[in-house]
Image (tube, grey):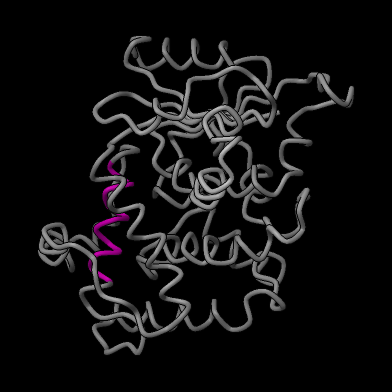
Amino acid sequence: MREAIAKLQARFGHKSEDIYIWIDYSSIPQKNRSSQTAAIDTIANYAALSKYFVVTAPAATHADTGLSCNVSTYLSRGWCRLEQWAAMASSTAFDHMYLCDGGDLHSISERQALMAQSVDVFEAEFTCPSDKERLVNVVLALFSFCIACGKHQHGPTKEILDLNRQRIFPPELFGDSVEVLEMELQKTLEGRPSAVFSATDFHRLLFARQELCRLHGSDLPEPVLDQFSEKIKTAALSTPTRIFKHSVATAANNMFTSLLLSSQRSKSNAHFDEGSKSAGPPASQSGTGGLSGIQVTGV
């Protein structure tokens, strides 16, 4: 982890005092059950709002179990896959995502297998199988970010989602929610009335998407900006308070609202998730405004 931080500092010229790190085990409250549950339920938010996302997965031996740990074992865990998907869904580019496997930093975009497996959350391993049901709403929200720009949204994430629908969105968990969400978002993109999203809802979604893209050095596709730039500016001045009429949209809006408010408060933060009991900064150090952030996730 320290090696990954040093390499990232050297590459981007960040000072140590300007970097804040979020490590899942160390930064999530472990004694207060209510606080712990709240932090776990919003873990995707931390991943999406980190300025950098770094997987640290060198070959190692687990201190407690004695088992081998590496990139493959990292990718086998459902929560790790969810975090990576959150980082991918938050931007239109993946220049902020890296893998450090004991050597140099590698761009995640160079490792297509990592990207493909990250969205396959429900086929991964969970210590508590019931966690899968808890993640349905979060995955719906991430999917909404991925399709918010319609035909103008392109890239490997969308291609991966299209190729593996049944595995990524198990019907027994999602029903027809994905199809409903796609249909209603497409209506709003085309300026048609939606039974789920009002025009204002959709503009707020685009605003949240744009804020996260800019955090990672990218922006919305030009055609979307040309069509909605003024509406997005208006959405930036409003506070999302409307309650959606459809449960699917309600689930997504909870994520959108949280991401939007968080991105307004914190333009960058740091997140390290090593999946072990490594020492790290307290939770109070996450979500700092105006500073360079790194999220590192790994074995």
Query: From which residue to which does the magenta span run?
Result: 202-214
Where is residue 296? Give x, y as percent.
Answer: 54, 28
Compare residues 18 and 163 and report the one nearer the observer. 18
Left or right: where 59 falls relative to 293: right
- SS majority, magenta: helix
Compare residues 47 and 188 and report the one nearer the observer. 47
Name the image quarter holding residue 198: bottom left
Residue 207 magenta-highlighted? yes
| Residue 188, above or below 275 | below
Q: Quadrant of the N terminus?
A: top right
Q: Quadrant of the C terminus?
A: top right
| Residue 206, above or below 182 | above
Q: Name the residue rendered at 35%, 52% in the picture.
A: 259
Q: Name the residue rendered at 68%, 57% in the picture.
A: 131
Name the image quarter holding residue 191: bottom left
Q: Name the residue rendered at 63%, 25% in the picture.
A: 56
| Residue 94, above or below 270 | below
Left or right: where 168 falls relative to 285: right
Compare residues 289 and 26 and report the one nearer the observer. 26
Left or right: where 190 falls relative to 249: left
Where is residue 61? Give x, y as percent.
Answer: 83, 19
Residue 172 magenta-highlighted? no
Where is residue 60? Give x, y as percent.
Answer: 79, 19
Name the image quarter holding residue 275: top right
Where is residue 277? Give x, y as percent.
Answer: 68, 23
- Residue furthest out toward the front: 32
Label total for image? 0
Q: Name the residue rendered at 54%, 39% in the picture.
A: 109
